[in-house]
Amino acid sequence: MALRKTAVIFGAGPGIGAAAAREFAALGYNLALVARTAPKLEWLVGRFEAEGATAKAFLADGADGNSIDAAVRDIRTWAEGDPGVMLFNAYTSQPAGWTHEVDPAGFSRSLIINAGAAQHLVHRFAPAMLAAREGSLLFTSNGFGIWPRGRGFGTLSAGKAAMRSIALTLAEDIAGSGVRVGLLTVNGPSARGTDYDPDVIAKEFVKLHDGSVTDTEIIYNGASGRGPDPL
């Protein structure tokens, strides 16, 4: 069965998630915007509809597999099939703290949100893409996934490293299938009007999607290319 021209943005916030959604809307994709809280999602849907895009909000908690599956079912019903693009953009930095002091239960939950949810979505959406021999599975990471840091960043570093591993091993596993796997590692804090403007960063996802960049991973060191300022 052919894939639908729908882009799922899992972790649709006002920054990189919204900017990436706008790029795919410009390519003619309908937008399935997924996040944990309704008010933020409804605001985004309203913005995209005002711009002429077709968009719908879906609620899911990255720590809850049942809610992810419910969102997947609802997306398939709305799209009348499986999406052609899935972008995993969700993350949590909590519980923050020194690695030896972080609560183990909270740390485990963060790994599920940062990495487990990504694999969960791949497990649900990859089969249809592989059968169709097309589609894109995209992921947002940051520099901590490559260069982990302590002093309060250990939780996020572990989660991003695990998610990066999922993306890279997935790319190896399904190489030659026709399905694109793309990992955008944003090596600095994103904010509009800075060297890491989300509207500029999001254009890198299109390169991963359309194959104009053939590597699995893009390491984005800012518009200037100089990288982040030292912490």
Image (spheres, grey):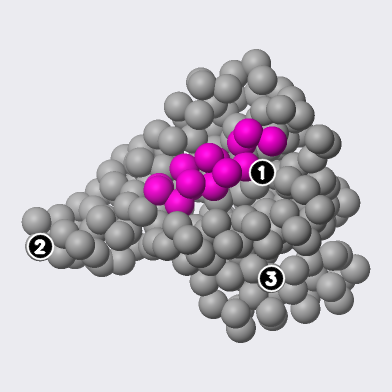
What is the quadrant of residue 22 in the picture?
Answer: bottom right
State the extent of the magenta-drawn residues as a range. Answer: 115-128
In the image: residue 56, left or right of residue 115: right
| Within-10-Å neighbours for mark 3: few <14, some 14–19, many 20+ | many
Question: Mark 3 sits on what residue?
Answer: 57
Q: Quadrant of the N terminus?
A: top right
Residue drawn at (49%, 35%), measured in percent from left and top?
167
Question: Mark 2 sits on what residue?
Answer: 101
Q: Earlier in the sequence, mark 1 or mark 3?
A: 3
- Callouts 3 and 2 close, C-beta under 8 Å: no
Residue drawn at (40%, 57%), measured in percent from left and top?
113
Q: Nearer the viewer, mark 3 or mark 2?
A: 3
Q: CA distance from mark 3 to mark 2?
A: 37 Å
Q: Position of residue 15 (x, y in %)?
A: 59, 65
Q: Position of residue 51 (x, y in %)?
A: 87, 70
Q: CA distance from mark 1 to mark 3?
A: 21 Å
- Callouts 1 and 3 close, C-beta under 8 Å: no
Q: Name the residue type under label 2.
A: Glu
Q: Earlier in the sequence, mark 3 or mark 2?
A: 3
Disc on res. 205: 1
